Image (spheres, grey):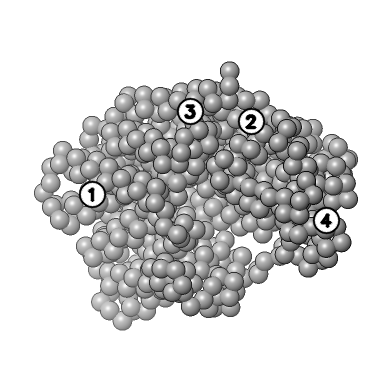
Amino acid sequence: MDQFTINLLFVGGSFALYIGIAIWARAGSTSEFYAAGRGVHPVTNGMATAADWMSAASFISMAGLIAFTGYDNSTFLMGWTGGYVLLALLLAPYLRKFGKFTVSEFIGDRFYSQTARIVAVVCLIVASTTYVIGQMTGVGVAFGRFLEVDNTTGLLIGACVVFAYAVFGGMKGVTYTQVAQYVVLITAYTIPAVFISLQLTGNPIPGLGLFGDDVASGVPLLTKLDQVVTDLGFNSYTAHHSDTLNMVLFTLSLMIGTAGLPHVIMRFFTVPKVSDARWSAGWTLVFIALLYLTAPAVGAMARLNITEMMWPNGGINGGAVAVETIAEDPKYDWMDTWQKTGLLDWEDKNGDGKIQYYNDQNAEMQVVAEEKGWVGNELTKFNRDILVLANPEIANLPSWVIGLVAAGGLAAALSTAAGLLLAISSAVSHDLIKGAINPRISEKGELLSARIAMAVAIVVATYLGLNPPGFAAQTVALAFGLAAASIFPALMMGIFSTRINNVGAVAGMLAGLVVTLVYIFLHKGWFFIPDTNMFTDADPLLGPVKSTSFGAVGALVNFIVAYVVSGITKETPQEIKDLVQSVRIPRGAGTAVDGH
């Protein structure tokens, strides 16, 4: 059986499963559409939340980012995992106790303001839409490779699948679909990692293999990797090379940005009790850890495999791989396959019949290159997003593993896309239409408007995925920056401070939103129009603070403005203070609190 047929079986089988589950769990009421009828078991919810949390960025991109940078990109691991811990400890149980369907509804009720609710809806829609574009684009790339269709066709197929199970199933359908997607994605991620860890270190547990010895040389794996990459003029893999302040701010921006993204917060509204929200948060962390503890090993081992494939004759002194070998050796077939996608390319610039892969920006390597007659790095393109998808082929693993990874990558992208689209549709139908425009709308009308809103969101996300603006990387920064600077501070102050009033909350959200947008536009171009930027991330406005790290600063602005404005305006009404106290203090603890 050829590879295409195997891919088709794995991907087609998983899609049939998702759509079947959605039909079985079809939402019949607004409660089922928004919160799965609040009847989801904590373990089930933990698994669904983990699938929602681990997007195409976690499955496809993260290991590639770590592989080509090393220690400095551990910020992604720390930021995203830390963000979940913040969410689980500081937000989820209290929001569940509040008993509403959406984040915007909590903000509107807590700050007794329709304006605050609408501002939260705007922040939520912009952040979620920019985030979902990346997921849909990832679907197109994965389909293009594994189903051997063009990117446009792949994206349209993916959009139809999401439409089928998200629009009809709502949160109930998405929840049980995400459980299946978690099983698919974690199996697809772990099995190749186990094989590769066994090959390189003899240890079947990738996380332990990372700190074990390389079987071929007998030296520690990370020591060997450091030596291999520094010989080629790259930074050592395990050392810290970037600015520490920017690294801390970037990690913090990812943490509070992800804790403020509403599609995951919504999952904690689906469990029966507040204690279940805490338990499902704990289970989610367990399920996330299975992938996040494996990702550093996947990145390091893939980097070593790729480098040794480019220098198969004993490193830089033994000689680079020959063009003829790439063309004829079955071990290198993956390079030809990925070259067709446009995400991998090479060129024999000096005509010596070999492909020299090295850091041609390093001054010391330029001297070595001149001595050897090299004229630049000849592995001219290696898109980091292909690393995990290509990993089984690079390690020469069986065909069924490649098919499984195809299904896993698509499961990761589709599960998050569905969660984000559900957050957008809930904001439009429940917060905007029912909350502001037509409060008397019937449940049937609200359910219809939610499905129409989701269908429109899918069309918009698909269009932008088909025609991605030239600022794909910036949209991710914008999504995290917006959530960090606007939604997260409002939630934190809403739960833990009775001093913040309606005027302060709105002023804080708007201040955080505007200052973050302006900082990003100054570095990426006004409204992302090329050549309108005044600064670059290589030379930022505020010392070392890049635009991608500014979300933490925007959040600080939000907090300060909210407190200052609340201090000079009318005090929060007593009934709202009582509401905050009732949300924050466990039932039955009043006597202990009053008596200290």
Sooner in the amino-acid sequence: mark 3 or mark 2: 3
* Measured Cα–Cα span from mark 3 to mark 4: 40 Å
Sequence-wise, the earlier of marks 3 and 4 is 3
CA separation, marks 1 and 2? 42 Å
Q: Is residue 439 above or below residue 251?
A: above
Of all residues shown, which one is farthest toward the top?
A: 1
Q: Nearer the viewer, residue 164 or 536?
A: 536
Q: Quadrant of the C terminus?
A: bottom left
Query: Which three-letter amino acid code belongs to the residue tagged 3?
Result: Val
Quarter of the rendering occupied by the N terminus: top right
Amino acid type of the residue that numbered disc 1 sits on in the rendered structure: His
Q: Nearer the viewer, residue 267 or 420?
A: 420
Q: Residues within 10 Å of mark 4 (few under 14, many from 20)?
A: some
* Observer able to see residue 247: yes
- Is 93 left or right of 433, judged from the image as shown? right
Q: Residue 231, which numbered label? A: 4
* Residue 495 drawn at (x, y percent): 38, 60
Disc 1: which residue:
430
Mark 4 vs mark 2, foreground winner is: 4
Residue sitting at x 49%, y 31%:
147
- Residue 333 screen position, x and y as percent: 67, 34
**In the rendered image, which residue does mark 2 sit on?**
191
**Mark 3 highlights which residue?**
11
**Which callout, 1 or 3, points at the residue further toward the start of the chain?**
3
